[in-house]
Image: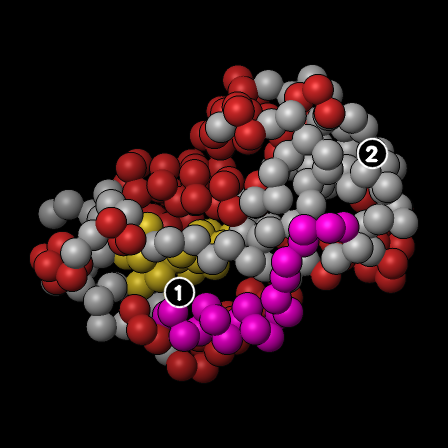
Amino acid sequence: MQLGGATWLDVAATQGSALLAVPIGSLEQHGPHLPLDTDTRIAMEVAARLSAARGGVMVAPAVAYGASGEHAAFPGTLLINHAVLADLLMELVRSARSSFAGVVVVSAHGGNGEGLTLFRERCQADGDDVLIWSATTPGGDAHAGRSETSMVLAIDPGAVRTDLAEAGCTDPIEFILPRLRAEGVRPVSSNGVLGDPRGASAAEGELLLAALTMDLVEAVDAHWPMVGRPA
């Protein structure tokens, strides 16, 4: 169930037994062919699939802004810093305490990592039961490449401008990471792509989304073996 479309009576009927999934993404450039909200779309999709696969999970409206300083040189990128992200998530968790058994944060933007670490530390200090899960695609492109393009094709093919898809910087991420941290993405890749989106397909995207969902379900089950599961 989507929390945004629920009434307070719907939430009360769970008697505090449901988990709350909070998708978080970003609003940042994803090359010339993908929408700015790519990460948010992926986080929302995986969170919705978690709810459908497991039950006992309500999905909150997404946090659509993230820590995207490395993309700030591209028009349209809107961002918040790590401390603000941690503060925002902390306030959401505090307000969820009386209504939900726990909170799972579903992040699809790697740049949120530092803010999520701050958030985790504060949750531990306050004793909140929170799971932080981040989407990773082993072997995939670093940014706006084949993996993300395939997933958006599976979610909303009309959002992908396939005629504009082109390779960007294809150097291994470990080689370019120092420059990315020091200078941001644009000096490294003028079109914003780190990888090559050509060859992406909705079928490949569906496989990637299914794998992410399975990983998330397993993480939630391990953290809350009984919570939200039918008796």
Disc 1 target residue: 130
Q: Which mark is residue 145?
A: none
Percent of width and height locating residue 189: 85, 42
- Taking the image as shown, residue 91 lies to the left or right of residue 120, namely left
Q: Which mark is residue 168?
A: 2
Neighbour tally class for label 1: few under 14, some 14-19, many 20 plus, Cα within 10 Å: many
Q: Residue furthest bottom?
A: 125
SS label for mark 2: loop
The part of the chain drawn in magenta is 74-93
Q: Residue at x 69, y 45 (%)?
A: 29
Q: Kindly tell me whether residue 124 is visible in this rendering.
A: yes
Name which quarter of the figure residue 101 lies in.
bottom left
Percent of width and height locating residue 104: 39, 57
Say what amino acid the circle numbered 2 marks.
Answer: Gly
Callouts 1 and 2 close, C-beta under 8 Å: no
SS label for mark 1: strand
**Is 92 drawn above or below residue 231 in the view shown?**
below
How many numbered discs, if any?
A: 2
Percent of width and height locating residue 82: 62, 69
Q: Residue at x 40, y 81 (%)?
A: 126
Q: Residue at x 81, y 50 (%)?
A: 185
**Is 34 drawn above or below residue 15 in the view shown?**
above
Q: CA distance from mark 1 to mark 2?
A: 37 Å
Q: Residue at x 82, y 34 (%)?
A: 168
Instruction: Indicate whether residue 42 is drawn in magenta.
Output: no
Q: Judge by depth and name the residue closer to the eye, 193 or 120.
A: 193
